[in-house]
Amino acid sequence: MELRAEPAVEGLEMSEAKSGAGGTSEGDDYESLPSHASFTTHMTAGAVAGVLEHTVMYPVDSVKTRMQSLQPDPNAQYRGVYEALRRIVRTEGVLRLLRGLNITVLGAGPAHALYFACYERIKHSLSNVIQNGGNSHLANGLAGSVATVLHDAVMNPAEVVKQRLQMYRSPYRGLFDCVLTVSRTEGAAAFYRSYSTQLTMNIPFQAVHFIVYEVTQERLNPERRYWPGTHMLSGAAAGAVSAAVTTPLDVCKTLLNTQENVALSSAHVSGHLSGMANAFRAVYRLGGVPAFFRGVQARVIYQMPSTAIAWSVYEFFKYFLTQRKHHGLEGPSRAAIDRAGTT
């Protein structure tokens, strides 16, 4: 995702020259992506992208959480994503699929603002060192990993509350009841009980995610222009691959977040389960190797469009905000000057 920008006048002249030559490509409709967008621009674009990423596919995320339950209630055992969605709507109502959406939105905005802004800044700095300013897969992976540490520090408490509200027959009346009850009965540390597992999952997830995205962009959009179709396809591919390979860690994270009573009792765990190693042992004891891939279908179905939405929205807002700022600073565009000269 190397971002390059040409001045508006130069871009227009190139476009006019190509048009006059007798043809244009789809990529010529757009100017190149900005190379040095401000930190605020990255944060704003990232916040909008993060909120949309988590909200558009939220019902599927609710299904994924339930399908990862290791000892589900007989009424919450689903054969597939579509069957789960249909049955939840029929027996519990449409709004049940949206439980926990409020805390997700509150966490996703600032978490993704930090995530994308830090990724861009760190990637640019590392690429200058490693590849002399060129695109470096190592820089992309390292930048994604560091950005994930900050993202998860903000998002982890929201994930805990969200997943507890998503579970079948959740005992909590709503967001504030869940926060107060967990704080009172388990302490504030409960909101970060899965943080190490979340990082262990998300660091490889984001490293794979960014590398796949950048590699796909090199193939589909080598000139790195603002081209929505390539951003969506690259994002979808990155989301699918990274989601599939990190599903075992996601299952452990879900168990740590929900502290599923029936599952912990079956695994002979007394009190609260904590620690990634303990979670791995509990999951294996309850279902063997297949248990680590519970909900993988729902996870991939959720991540593909979510990541495609996140990247396309992020690139659009970054392009839009930067171009608006650029034209505001540079004054009237070349086209406006030409129109004024003909009147």
Image (cartoon, helix red, strand yellow):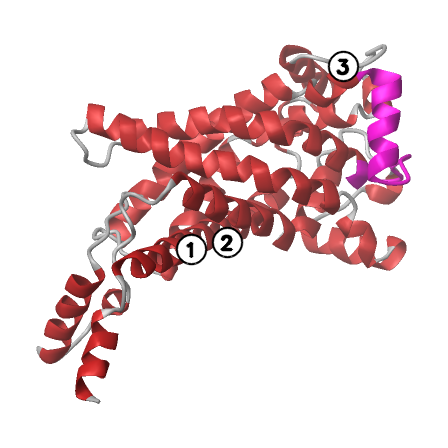
Relative to 43, does residue 125 appear above or below in the rendering?
A: above
Q: Which mark is residue 107?
A: none
Camera-nearest residue between 286 and 322: 322
Q: Amino acid at mark 1?
A: Met
Label 3, residues with CA under 10 Å away: few <14, some 14-19, many ≥20: many
Judged from the image, the secondary structure of the residue bearing numbered disc 1 is helix
The answer to whether residue 265 of the structure is visible from this angle is: no
CA gap between label 3 and label 2 equals 35 Å
Q: Which mark is residue 309?
A: 2
Q: Which residue is mark 1?
A: 232
Q: Classify residue 110 by image quadrant.
A: top right
Q: Which residues are magenta?
A: 165-187
Residue 82, x across and y down, in percent? 70, 56
Q: Which residue is mark 3?
A: 273
Report the magenta stretch's main SS.
Answer: helix
Residue 122 covered by magenta stretch:
no
Camera-nearest residue between 217 and 116: 116
| Residue 134 appears left or right of 286 | left
Residue 140, x across and y down, in percent? 33, 32
Q: Amino acid at mark 2?
A: Ile
